[in-house]
Image (cartoon, rainbow, N blue to C red):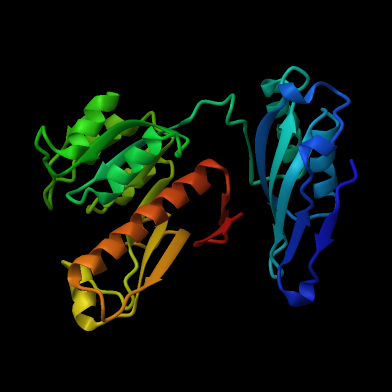
Amino acid sequence: MNLLWRLVSPNFGPQVYKFAKRSLKSVKFPFGSSNSLVHGIHVFHCPDEVGIVAKLSDCIASRGGNILTADVFVPEDNSVFYSRSEFTFDPAIWPRGEMDEDFFKLSKMFNAMKSVVRVPEIDPKYKIAVLVSKQDHCIVDLLHRWQNGRLPVDITSVISNHDRGPDAHVIRLLERHGIPYYYLPTTMGKKREVEILDLVHDTDFLILARYMQVFSAEFLKSYGKDIINIHHGLLPSFKGGRPSKQAFEAGVKLIGATSHFVSEGLDAGPIIEQMVERVSHRDNLRSFIQKSEDLEKQCLAKAIKSYCELRVLPYEKDKTVVF
């Protein structure tokens, strides 16, 4: 396979390699019919050394696979290697189990910190639980995107510390799709973390869709998997109650939203996605809040989609690589 690649000089920043995209119509598949091909994704994180790209490419090509896109990142001040590849393959020629074994051998060869392969058409969807407080805009948006097939997840439950009546829009949506809703009221001294853990133990990751509670270090350790949070990114930052009203009254011109992983520090986890939008003197409080909530919905949905597509990798202590 004659893959074309371009190297940006390290004099101009981190090394970034881009493989050329090729149309499937122009590619010959000696191992089988293109009608039987499915799509795979592989991400790799290991100490940097010569030959990694060649071995990854050969692993896929030797099994009749065809790389469609590949992104590589090597920081200029740290000898570590990150890559994300998308490829097509014939599962009759390269069975799913053998694919795992092949990539596992590569991970052992290069002492990889992370090596994950995913085949969306074959692998089960990620199972998630969504936690929410009083505000509905993020959870309603996620449910509609999920319903329309735009989020590659299975929502196993919605958990809230705010009671909703049986006629609430969220409750009707959940009932329509058979998704359980759990109301667990919280107080300063009772966060209901043991009960939440019992409800989410079989999920792949959690979403905090404006869940206005802080999890303890014990909870994070016990759950042991990723948790994605969304919060306003109003500039400048306004703390406490009704931040949108505070920012509006201060006359800010730029608002935003941030989606990040949950860590022990308050709103201090590695950032996955951020969005901003301008506001002006023409906005009233209602339009100001609407714009802020729209950003939160878009930012959270994009972060979830990026995570499910294996675009997000840990970078240093508090950063991420997002391909």
Hey, which residue is sitting farthest left in the picture?
165
Which percent across, then down, holds residue 209?
30, 48
Judge by depth and name the residue closer to the eye, 310 or 90: 90
Quarter placement of the C terminus: bottom right
Which percent across, then down, holds residue 94?
75, 23
Query: Which residue sits at x=20%, y=51%?
Result: 135
Which percent across, then down, holds residue 315?
58, 59
Judge by depth and name the residue closer to the eye, 281 or 254: 281
Left or right: residue 226 compared with residue 247: right
- Residue 93 sits in which quadrant? top right
Left or right: residue 79 compared with residue 120: right
Query: Which residue sits at x=24%, y=76%?
Result: 247
Judge by depth and name the residue closer to the eye, 229 or 317: 229
Which percent across, then down, holds residue 239?
23, 71
Query: Which residue sits at x=43%, y=45%?
Result: 226
- Residue 205 sits in which quadrant? top left
Query: Which residue sits at x=11%, y=40%?
Result: 163
Left or right: residue 91 compared with residue 207: right
Q: Is residue 79 above or below residue 235?
A: above
Quarter placement of the N terminus: top right
